[in-house]
Image (cartoon, helix red, strand yellow):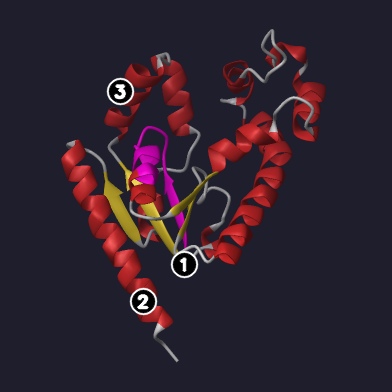
Amino acid sequence: MPLIGLTGNIGSGKSTVARLLAERGATVIDADALARSAVEPGTPALEAILHRWGPGVLSPDGVLDRGALRRRVFGDPLELDALNAIVHPEVERMRWQLVNDARARGDRTVVCDIPLLFERGLMGDFDRIVLVDAPRPLRLDRLVRDRGLRETEAMDMIVAQMPAELKRAGADHIIDNDGSREALEARVAEVWDALVSEASAEAALP
């Protein structure tokens, strides 16, 4: 069962690509969804977050206010590292459980959607790495327009990630998302066909 790492800097359109791959039959494991599950009320991760940053990062209904927490940690590498140390181990545990479940079911291809794949040095976990990329000004515009972020807040999130230029060198396939939806769908289809072909070739090896 091929295990594909899908990544891309914020605003690149990675989530759209993940949906398109799912439509083609991939089992998609979304690290962001797992991160939200890891900090649900009553979880050890949320308790650790509250111990470090206090109740000001909770919404009135007791759910983690991700925006409030983001404002606390972005721009401060030590605080961001502390948050990652709390959340990432639990996300990793859940991800591997889902991978093993997919393998047991006999799923054809698993795609792990991981924004910080390169930053966390997870390249060796995957058979292939697919990078979704777009120019920084376009990503900034998407964050401000589509997510309602302030420009300064969006830029802080962009610069907190490894430059895409460095990631391109480590990717097996690159999907540039700087054009139309039709162009993106065509490029995703090309990459999917290549992944299937590569998996078939490797499966045929003695």
**Spot occupied by residue 57 in the image (x, y as percentages of width and height):** 69, 16
Which numbered disc, 1 or 2, marks the residue that appears first in the sequence? 1
**Spot occupied by residue 75 in the image (x, y as percentages of width and height):** 56, 25
Identify residue type, mark 3. Asp
Q: How far apart are marks 2 and 3 (CA)?
A: 39 Å
Q: Mark 1 points at which residue?
A: 2
Q: In this rendering, which labeled residue sits more in front, label 1 or label 3?
A: 1
Identify residue type, mark 1. Pro
* Residue neighbourhood size for the residue with mark 3, other residues' Cα within 10 Å, grouped as few (<14), some (14–19), many (≥20): some
Residue drawn at 68 percent across, 29 percent down? 79
Q: Mark 2 points at which residue?
A: 200
> Vertical placement of 123 versus 154: above or below?
below
**Spot occupied by residue 45 in the image (x, y as percentages of width and height):** 76, 33
Identify residue type, mark 2. Ser
Give the quadrant of residue 8.
Answer: top left
Instruction: Tell me whether circle 1 and circle 3 mark residues in contact (CB < 8 Å).
Output: no
Residue drawn at 35 percent across, 20 percent down? 146
Q: What stretch is highlighted in magenta?
A: 3-19
> Vertical placement of 110 versus 31: above or below?
below
Query: Is 8 left, or right, of 87 in this rendering?
Result: left
- Using the rendered image of the protein, determine whether residue 11 is visible from the camera's viewpoint: yes
Query: Is 118 left, or right, of 61 in this rendering?
Result: left
Residue 128 drawn in magenta: no
Front residue of 131 and 110:
110
* Residue neighbourhood size for the residue with mark 1, other residues' Cα within 10 Å, grouped as few (<14), some (14–19), many (≥20): many
**Spot occupied by residue 46 in the image (x, y as percentages of width and height):** 75, 28
Q: Mark 3 points at which residue?
A: 141
Instruction: Tell me whether circle 1 and circle 2 mark residues in contact (CB < 8 Å).
Output: no
Outermost residue toward the front in this view:
105
Q: How far apart are marks 1 and 2 (CA)?
A: 10 Å
Q: In this rendering, which labeled residue sits more in front, label 2 or label 3?
A: 2
